[in-house]
Image (spheres, rainbow, N blue to C red):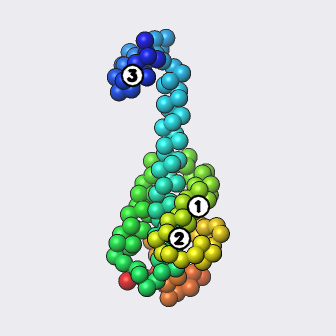
Amino acid sequence: MSSNLYEQDFYAWANQQAALLRSGQLAAADIDHIAEEIESMGKTEKRELVNRLAVLVLHMLKWRFQAGFRSKSWIRTIKEQRIALARHIIDNPSLKSKRDEAIDDAYRTALVGAVDETNLPEETFPPACPWSFEQLMDESFWPGDAESESDREKNRGFKPL
C-alpha cells in the first residue's frame, strides 16, 4: 500500500512514512522509496550550491566585463548570493569537498548567461572560472576594479561604487 500511495499522493505517503518511523514500525515503512528520497534531498543541496554559484559567477562576469553597466542591483545580487552561499555551506559542511566541482558546473551555466546578457562573444570570457571559491566569497573582492587582484590584501577598505 505504501508504494501505491507514494505514486498517488506523495504528501500523504511522506506523512505516513514519518509516522511509521517515529513509532518504530520499520518493517511497515517503505524503505526503498525512503532511501530514494533521502538521496534526492542530498542532490538537491548540491544543486542549490551550483545554482547559487552560477548566479554569483554570472554577476561577477558582468561586473568584470561590463564595468560601464555596473548597478546597485548587481551589487545586491552579489552580496545576497555570498550570504546565501555562506549559510548553505554552514548548513551543509560536507559540500565543502564539492566546491571545485560545483564551480566548474556553475561556470558553464554562468557563461551562457553572461554571453546572453552582455551580448559579448563567448571568446571574451575565460574558458574556466578565473576565481577561487575564496575569492568569490570575499566581500572585498570585486574583479576588474581599479585595484589589481594582487593588491586587494593591502586595500581592504576599498568599496565598489
> Looking at the picture, which amino acid does disc 1 mark?
Arg
Check whether the beta carbons of the residues at disc 2 and disc 1 lie within 8 A of each other: no
Q: Which of marks 2 and 1 is in front?
A: 2
The residue indicated by pointer 3 is: 8
Check whether the beta carbons of the residues at disc 3 and disc 2 lie within 8 A of each other: no
* SS at circle 2: helix
Quarter of the image for residue 72 reads bottom left
Count neighbours of disc 2 (C-alpha within 10 A) and say few if under 14, some if 14 to 19, many if 20 or more. Answer: some
> Looking at the picture, which amino acid does disc 2 mark?
Val
Distance Cα–Cα, label 3 vs label 2: 42 Å
Distance Cα–Cα, label 2 vs label 1: 11 Å
**Image location (x, y in percent) of residue 141:** 49, 75
The residue indicated by pointer 1 is: 108
77 and 137: which is toward the camera: 77
Which quarter shows the N terminus? top left
The residue indicated by pointer 2 is: 115
The outermost residue toward the bottom is 146
Residue at the spot x=46%, y=83% of the render? 67
**Residue 5 seen in this snapshot:** yes
110 and 160: which is toward the camera: 110
Query: Which of the two labelled residues, at mark 2 and mark 1, occupies the earlier sequence position?
Result: 1
> Looking at the picture, which amino acid does disc 3 mark?
Gln
Which quarter shows the C terminus? bottom left
**Image location (x, y in percent) of residue 134:** 55, 66
Check whether the beta carbons of the residues at disc 3 and disc 1 lie within 8 A of each other: no
Count neighbours of disc 1 (C-alpha within 10 A) and say few if under 14, some if 14 to 19, many if 20 or more. Answer: some
Residue at the spot x=46%, y=57% of the render? 52
Count neighbours of disc 3 (C-alpha within 10 A) and say few if under 14, some if 14 to 19, many if 20 or more. Answer: few
Quarter of the image for residue 126 reads bottom right
Query: Which of the two labelled residues, at mark 3 and mark 1, occupies the earlier sequence position?
Result: 3
Distance Cα–Cα, label 3 vs label 1: 37 Å
